[in-house]
C-alpha cells in the first residue's frame, strides 16, 4: 500500500513537530525545549555527537535516510515512518551546503513539508503561531457586482482582531489591490499582479517583485500592434494600453514605446480582445517561450465577452507569493490559509496549510480544496473564518 490517507489527517493536527537534519547539535537543544524534534540521519555513526545528545535523541522518532535507496522507495519509507509513529513534521531545517539538500528538498515538496535553509528563519517560524489568510478578490471576496458584503468585511476584522493577517491576493494591478484592501479593511500587505508583487502599503515599500525582460516585452508589444490586439502593459503605478483607454489608471501606448517605457519596469502583459481566434493563436505561440509564463487566462466559466490571457515572469504566481510572504513575516506555510475560485489560485491552494474554494468555482478547482464554502454571492470569508476559529 503506497498511499497513506492518515498523512493528510496528521497535517491538521496542531502539534509543534519539526524535523532537523542532524548536523547541528546546538540547534537541537535550542528548539527541543518548546517543540518535538525528529532527527533526520544519514548514518548510524554518532561518534561526533555528545553523550547527552545521543541519550536524548535515541528516544525520539529518528529517521535514517538510506542513500542507496531509490527516490520512490525512500519517499514510501518516510511515509511509513510518519504513519507508524503518528507524527508528521510541518517543517524541516537543512543547510543548503548539505550534500543531500536537493533530494531532501524534493521529498519535502512531495510531502508538503516546508524545507527551510536559513537557521534564523527556521527558529522564527517554529516559534510563530500567527496565521496568514490569503484572500482572492474577483469571484471570491467580491460578488458578481464587484461588491464586498458586510459579513465578509466583519470576518476580515475578526482575522485582524485575532492578531492574524488578512492579505488580498489578486491578479489585478497594485492600484486595484489597494482599493480592494481598503474596501475590505484587510491588512496592509498586498499581493498583486497574480503574485508578481508583494507590497507593504504601511511603509510604501516593495517586499518582492518579479518583472518581464524588456526585450521580450518589446517583442510582444510589436506583435500586438501588428496583429491589432489590445494589450495592457502593467507597471508599478499605472497601465499602458495599445488601444482603448478604459479607466483613469491607463495611458495610451504609441509607436515610440521603447522610449515611452524606458523608465518603467514591466510586471505583466495582458492580451485582451474580442477577436478570440487571434488571441488564442497568439497565446499558443507564447506558450513555447521558455523565458515567460502564461500566469493567468480566461476560465471555462468566465462569461466575459472578450478573450484574454496574462503573461508574466515564471515566478509570478500565487504559490511563489505565498512562500515569499511566509518568509517575510516569519510564519510557517503550515499556518497559511488560502481561499480562491480560479485556475490562477491553484498554486497557492496546493502549497497552503489549509485551502478553501468557493462554491462558484469550476469542479477542477474544487479538487484542490480542503473545504468548499459558499459562493461569492454569499459569505465565503465568514464561512472560512468560522471553520478556522471554531
Image (cartoon, rainbow, N blue to C red):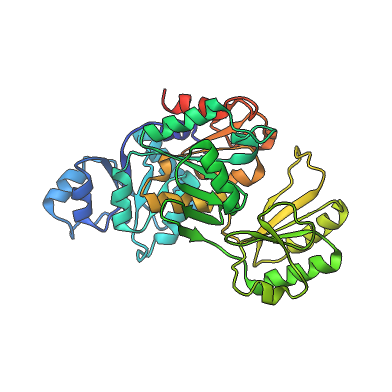
Instruction: Name the residue furthest left.
Output: 51
In the rendered image, the vertical position of residue 25 relative to residue 185, given as above or below:
below
Where residue 357 sits in the image (x, y, percent)?
A: 59, 33
Where residue 368 sits in the image (x, y, percent)?
A: 59, 37
Instruction: Name the residue furthest front.
Output: 248
In the rendered image, the vertical position of residue 44 relative to residue 254, given as above or below:
above
Task: Judge by depth and name the residue closer to the eye, 87 or 135.
Answer: 135
Task: Kindly identify the residue that appears in the image at 68 percent across and 54 percent down.
Answer: 248
Task: Judge by depth and name the residue closer to the eye, 147 or 134.
Answer: 147
Where residue 242 sits in the image (x, y, percent)?
A: 77, 63
Residue 45 seen in render: yes
Residue 367 seen in render: no
Q: How many marks?
A: 0
Kindly indicate the quadrant of the structure image that contains residue 302.
Answer: top right
In the rendered image, the vertical position of residue 249 relative to residue 129, given as above or below:
below
Q: Left or right? Give the position of 309 relative to 4.
A: right
Where residue 166 sits in the image (x, y, percent)?
A: 46, 39
Task: Kindly identify the residue that appears in the image at 60 percent across and 48 percent down.
Answer: 176
Q: Left or right? Give the position of 106 relative to 291.
A: left
Q: Left or right? Give the position of 243 relative to 30.
A: right
Kindly indicate the quadrant of the structure image that contains residue 342.
Answer: top right
Kindly indicate the quadrant of the structure image that contains residue 339.
Answer: top right
Task: Kindly identify the residue that appears in the image at 66 percent across and 59 percent down.
Answer: 239
Amino acid at each position: 500500500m503506497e498511499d497513506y490517507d492518515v498523512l493528510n489527517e496528521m497535517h491538521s493536527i496542531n502539534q509543534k513537530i519539526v524535523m532537523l537534519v542532524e548536523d547541528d547539535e546546538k540547534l537541537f537543544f535550542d528548539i527541543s525545549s518548546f517543540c518535538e524534534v525528529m532527527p533526520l540521519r544519514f548514518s548510524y555513526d554518532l561518534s561526533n555527537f555528545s553523550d547527552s545528545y545521543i541519550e536524548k535523541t535515541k528516544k525520539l522518532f529518528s529517521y535514517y535516510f538510506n542513500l542507496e535507496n531509490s527516490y520512490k522507495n525512500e519517499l514510501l519509507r518516510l511515509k511509513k515512518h510518519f504513519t507508524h509513529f503518528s507524527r508528521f513534521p510541518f517543517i524541516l531545517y537543512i543547510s543548503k551546503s548539505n550534500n543531500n539538500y536537493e533530494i531532501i528538498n524534493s521529498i519535502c515538496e512531495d510531502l508538503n513539508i516546508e524545507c527551510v535553509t536559513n537557521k534564523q528563519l527556521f527558529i522564527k517560524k517554529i516559534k510563530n503561531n500567527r496565521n496568514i489568510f490569503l484572500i482572492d478578490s474577483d469571484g471570491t471576496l467580491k460578488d458578481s457586482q464587484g461588491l464586498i458584503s458586510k459579513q465578509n468585511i466583519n470576518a476580515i476584522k475578526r482575522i485582524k482582531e485575532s492578531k492574524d493577517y488578512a492579505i488580498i491576493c489578486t491578479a489585478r494591478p497594485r492600484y486595484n489591490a489597494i482599493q480592494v484592501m481598503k474596501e475590505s479593511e484587510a491588512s496592509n500587505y498586498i499581493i498583486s499582479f497574480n503574485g508578481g508583487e508583494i507590497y507593504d502599503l504601511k511603509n510604501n515599500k516593495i517586499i518582492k517583485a518579479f518583472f518581464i525582460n524588456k526585450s521580450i516585452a518589446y517583442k510582444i508589444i510589436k506583435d500586438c500592434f501588428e496583429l491589432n490586439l489590445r494589450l495592457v502593459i502593467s507597471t508599478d503605478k499605472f497601465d499602458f494600453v495599445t488601444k482603448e483607454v478604459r479607466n483613469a489608471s491607463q495611458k495610451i501606448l504609441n509607436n515610440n514605446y521603447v522610449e515611452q517605457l524606458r523608465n518603467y519596469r514591466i510586471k505583466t502583459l495582458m492580451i485582451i480582445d474580442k477577436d478570440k481566434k487571434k488571441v488564442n493563436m497568439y497565446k499558443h505561440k507564447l506558450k513555447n517561450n521558455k523565458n515567460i509564463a502564461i500566469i493567468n487566462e480566461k476560465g471555462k466559466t468566465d462569461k466575459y465577452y472578450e478573450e484574454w490571457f496574462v503573461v508574466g515572469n515564471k515566478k509570478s504566481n500565487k504559490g511563489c507569493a505565498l512562500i515569499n510572504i511566509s518568509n517575510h513575516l516569519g510564519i510557517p506555510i503550515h499556518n497559511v490559509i488560502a481561499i480562491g475560485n480560479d485556475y490562477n489560485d491553484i498554486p497557492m491552494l496546493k502549497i497552503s496549510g489549509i485551502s478553501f474554494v468557493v462554491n462558484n468555482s469550476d469542479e477542477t478547482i474544487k479538487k484542490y480544496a480542503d473545504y468548499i464554502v459558499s459562493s461569492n454571492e454569499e459569505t465565503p470569508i465568514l464561512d472560512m473564518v468560522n471553520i478556522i476559529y471554531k
